[in-house]
Image (cartoon, helix red, strand yellow):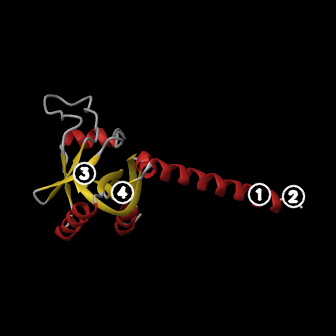
């Protein structure tokens, strides 16, 4: 395989490490951003084993910089005294314009930053963060009802296509 073909495959590869499904249930996602994450060596090794949890994670903006908080990356088992703290605060790497846009949106309308997924892209760890608005319990019930209704419609259409209902 020629070298240029291999590099083009690497550009499109995206290996998922962890996903936050609960965030899509608890929040209305308005916008998403891809950010790099500043990590130590043992954190990257632990992530290569596919171990991380985004469930309680969130992002904050302090002094014009974005930080990922409460994301759990377990200690690397073969690590020595250089091992990392599992829930430490990690800096996110975003463009200045994106950070300014996020500052404006989170200040004005009470939106929050939630991590949706953590993945490897071209050998670098990236996090997809979402600008999100918290859902009320009745919004969640409406979403569940809508999903159930859609499922029933699909079932009925499927039965009709098979000729079970005339």
The residue pinned by badge 3 equals: 59
**Which residue corresponds to mark 1?**
156
Helix, strand or loop at mark 2: loop
On the image, the x and y values in percent for residue 125 come to 28, 52
Q: Secondary structure at mark 4?
A: strand
Q: Are circles 2 and 4 on residues that touch, CB within 8 Å?
A: no
Q: Residue at x 31, y 59 (%)?
A: 122
Spatial CA span between label 1 and label 3 = 43 Å
Residue at numbered disc 4: 133
Number of the front mark, 2 or 4: 4
Residue 100: image location, x then y, percent: 18, 67
Mark on residue 109? none
80 w.r.t. 25: above or below: above
How packed mark 1 is, by other alpha carbons closer than 10 Å (few <14, some 14-19, many 20 or more), is some
Q: Residues within 10 Å of mark 4 (few under 14, many from 20)?
A: some
Q: Nearer the viewer, residue 56 or 145?
A: 145
Could you tell me which residue is drawn at 30 percent across and 61 percent down? 34
The residue carrying pointer 3 sits among few (fewer than 14), some (14 to 19) or many (20 or more) residues within 10 Å by Cα, namely many
Q: Which badge, 2 or 1, comes first in the chain's sequence?
A: 1
Q: Could you say which disc has been placed on residue 165 in the image?
A: 2
Tell me which numbered mark, 3 or 2, is placed earlier along the sequence.
Answer: 3
């Amino acid at each position: 395989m020629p070298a240029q073909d291999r590099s083009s495959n690497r550009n499109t590869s995206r290996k998922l490490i962890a996903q936050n499904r609960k965030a899509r249930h608890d929040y209305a996602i308005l916008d998403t951003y891809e950010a790099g994450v500043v990590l130590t060596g043992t954190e990257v090794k632990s992530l290569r084993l596919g171990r991380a949890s985004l469930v309680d994670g969130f992002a904050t903006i302090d002094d014009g910089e974005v930080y990922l908080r409460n994301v759990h990356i377990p200690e690397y088992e073969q690590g020595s005294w250089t091992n990392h703290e599992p829930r430490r605060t990690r800096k996110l790497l975003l463009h200045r314009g994106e950070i300014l846009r996020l500052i404006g949106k989170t200040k004005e309308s009470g939106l929050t930053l939630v991590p949706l997924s953590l993945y490897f892209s071209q050998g670098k760890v990236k996090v997809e963060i979402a600008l999100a608005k918290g859902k009320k319990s009745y919004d969640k019930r409406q979403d569940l009802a809508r999903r159930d209704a859609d499922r029933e419609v699909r079932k009925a259409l499927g039965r009709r296509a098979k000729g079970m209902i005339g």
